[in-house]
């Protein structure tokens, strides 16, 4: 279909160019600039009317091709999600605090990046105080939620050293 449109456009352009040259020759002859015994069958006015009719036919053909072309759906590509809704989650096993993307769907399943324990977020929040803790082994600083239970054991997300708060 696309090749056919290009071919028709090329033919229409060629015809329009030839007609343009022809109308110039007729106008020059009628104004006495070309001395020729050749008769052009019609006067300049009649050729102009033919030109207007041809132009209207060309416009109708172009409108037909425009309206008959299949509509292309706009494809949105390259859109990147800049931010997502995130939830802070505390692992029940190692007490590591980490964030997960919240899709809004419940139950929201996740796995702990520290110990691999799988969990489910059901919409409840952990009660406690957010604390920053330095690992006794590697000095890595990470966040935990102190729920108040004692002994409160946790695991370093970097070196997996286990420790507890007393």
Image: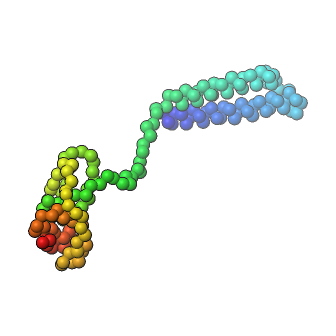
Numbered marks: total: 0
**Front one among 136 and 128:** 128
Quadrant in the rendering for residue 61: top right
Q: Which residue is drawn at 55% across and 36% down?
A: 6
**From the viewer's perspective, is 16 left or right of 99?**
right
**From the viewer's perspective, is 22 left or right of 128?**
right
Residue 41 seen: no
**Front one among 106 and 124:** 124
Q: In this view, does 72 lie above or below 80?
A: above
Q: Residue at x 46, y 32 (%)?
A: 70
Q: Which residue is drawn at 18% across and 65% down?
A: 146
Q: Residue furthest left?
A: 151
Residue 128 seen: yes
**From the viewer's perspective, is 87 left or right of 81?**
left
Name the quarter where the C terminus is drawn. Answer: bottom left
The color scheme shown is rainbow
Quadrant in the rendering for residue 127: bottom left
Q: Residue at x 22, y 72 (%)?
A: 133
**Front one among 153 and 22:** 153
The percent coordinates of residue 123 (x first, y second) are: 21, 49
The percent coordinates of residue 131 (x first, y second) are: 24, 67
**Front one among 32 and 92:** 92
Q: Is residue 116 above or below residue 19?
A: below
The percent coordinates of residue 120 (x first, y second) are: 17, 51
The percent coordinates of residue 118 (x first, y second) are: 15, 56
Quadrant in the rendering for residue 112: bottom left
């Amino acid at each position: 279909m696309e090749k056919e449109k290009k071919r028709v456009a090329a033919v229409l352009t060629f015809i329009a160019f030839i007609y343009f040259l022809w109308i110039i020759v007729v106008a020059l002859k009628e104004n006495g600039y070309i001395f020729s015994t050749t008769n052009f069958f019609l006067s300049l006015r009649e050729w102009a009317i033919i030109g207007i009719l041809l132009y209207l036919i060309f416009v109708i053909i172009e409108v037909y091709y425009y309206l008959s072309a299949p509509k292309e759906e706009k494809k949105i590509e390259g859109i990147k999600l800049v931010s997502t809704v995130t939830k802070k989650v505390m692992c029940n096993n190692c007490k590591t605090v980490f964030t997960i993307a919240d899709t809004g769907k419940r139950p929201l399943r996740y796995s702990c990046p520290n110990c691999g324990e799988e969990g489910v977020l059901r919409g409840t929040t952990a009660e406690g105080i957010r604390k920053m803790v330095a690992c006794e082994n590697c000095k890595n600083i990470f966040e935990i939620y102190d729920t108040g239970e004692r002994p409160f054991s946790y695991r370093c997300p970097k070196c997996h050293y286990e420790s507890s708060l007393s």
